[in-house]
Image: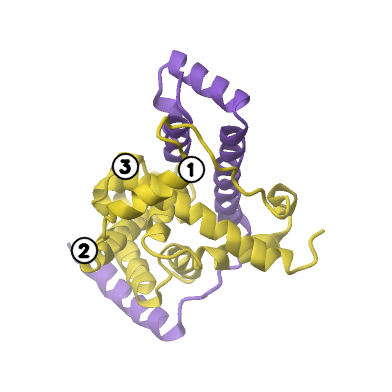
Chain colours: A yellow, B purple
């Protein structure tokens, strides 16, 4: 608990952005860990084993929050976004905006990842939930659609929005600094 | 041959690994030839790359901030002690 409590809490916070939900997740993870301790074979670090349990708890928390605030599938939004991009023939018409800095050059800077963590918070719901499940928790498209009760097409729109918002937030926060 | 719309859907959903080799070939060909999809692909790749590096950073160098509040930590410790006592009895 002393060794991994803070790690798991920080992990849950980076996914859920809610202190109470994150604390609940840590508690559920440790309780489930104690129950399942006999099944732990020691083949990997216990930290990552606990994180594996926590992943399911995070998905449960997101599912719960989605049930409380149902994702509004706004078809108009979906077609609007697509109409900016594609002609009726499905050919792209808009050039994606390039990065204002080269993110790959910032990877070695630990400060960049702190900024990245803060910027995830700037992504609005439900795009953030889609981003967390698909990109950070590596869930399959079908699984994410099932958890969020959305269509694959809408997931595409949400992920696109999340990437755009994250890019804007990163550019604002990072290019404001002295980029090496 | 894919249209840009199909390509961007596939890239965004990252389901290209599930495509047949022939379809994957045409998708890659489209991305190489089309300036829009090439740039879009680059951004999707940047996003994936960033998330992968972030997860590595989290697992190895994380400063563990924010920390679990002390009150909740003590509460949880007591709960865990009770739970392990209960499971050792069983």
Pinpoint the chain carrying mark 2.
A
Point out the tag, 2 or 1, that comes first from the N-terminus: 2
Pinpoint the chain carrying mark 3.
A
Name the residue located 45 percent from the left edge and 82 percent from the top edge: B69
Tag 2–tag 1 contact (CB < 8 Å):
no
Distance CA(mark 2)–CA(mark 1): 32 Å
Answer left or right for B83 relative to A25.
left
Residue that numbered label 1 is attached to: A85
Q: Nearer the viewer, mark 3 or mark 1?
A: 1
Q: Quadrant of the C terminus of chain A?
A: bottom right
Residue that numbered label 3 is attached to: A152
Query: Does A89 sit above or below residue A17?
Result: above
Name the residue located 41 percent from the left edge and 86 percent from the top edge: B71
- Where disc 3 sits, the SS reads helix
Residue that numbered label 2 is attached to: A67
Crowding at dot 1, Cα within 10 Å, few <14 / some 14-19 / many 20+, comes out as: some
Query: Does A34 sit above or below residue A82?
Result: below
Q: Nearer the viewer, mark 2 or mark 3?
A: 3
The quarter holding residue A112 reads bottom right
The quarter holding residue A70 reads bottom left
């Amino acid at each position: 608990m002393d060794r991994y409590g803070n790690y798991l809490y920080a992990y849950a916070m980076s996914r859920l952005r809610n202190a109470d939900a994150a604390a609940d997740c840590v508690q559920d993870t440790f309780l489930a860990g104690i129950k399942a301790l006999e099944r732990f074979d020691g083949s990997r670090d216990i930290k990552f084993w606990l994180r594996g349990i926590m992943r399911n708890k995070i998905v449960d928390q997101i599912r719960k929050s989605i049930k409380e605030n149902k994702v509004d599938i706004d078809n108009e939004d979906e077609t609007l976004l697509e109409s900016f991009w594609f002609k009726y023939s499905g050919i792209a018409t808009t050039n994606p905006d390039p990065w204002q800095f080269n993110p790959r050059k910032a990877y070695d800077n630990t400060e960049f990842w702190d900024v990245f963590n803060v910027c995830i918070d700037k992504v609005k719901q439900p795009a953030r939930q889609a981003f967390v499940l698909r990109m950070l928790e590596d869930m399959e498209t079908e699984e994410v659609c099932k958890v969020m009760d959305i269509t694959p097409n809408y997931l595409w729109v949400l992920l696109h929005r999340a990437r755009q918002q994250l890019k804007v937030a990163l550019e604002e926060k990072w290019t404001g600094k002295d980029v090496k | 041959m894919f249209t840009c719309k199909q390509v961007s859907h596939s890239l965004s959903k990252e389901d290209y690994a599930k495509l047949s080799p022939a379809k994957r070939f045409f998708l890659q060909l489209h991305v190489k030839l089309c300036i829009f999809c090439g740039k879009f692909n680059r951004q999707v790749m940047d996003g994936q790359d960033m998330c992968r590096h972030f997860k590595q950073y989290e697992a190895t160098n994380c400063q563990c901030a924010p920390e679990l509040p002390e009150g909740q930590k003590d509460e949880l410790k007591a709960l865990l002690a009770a739970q392990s006592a209960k499971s050792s009895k069983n």
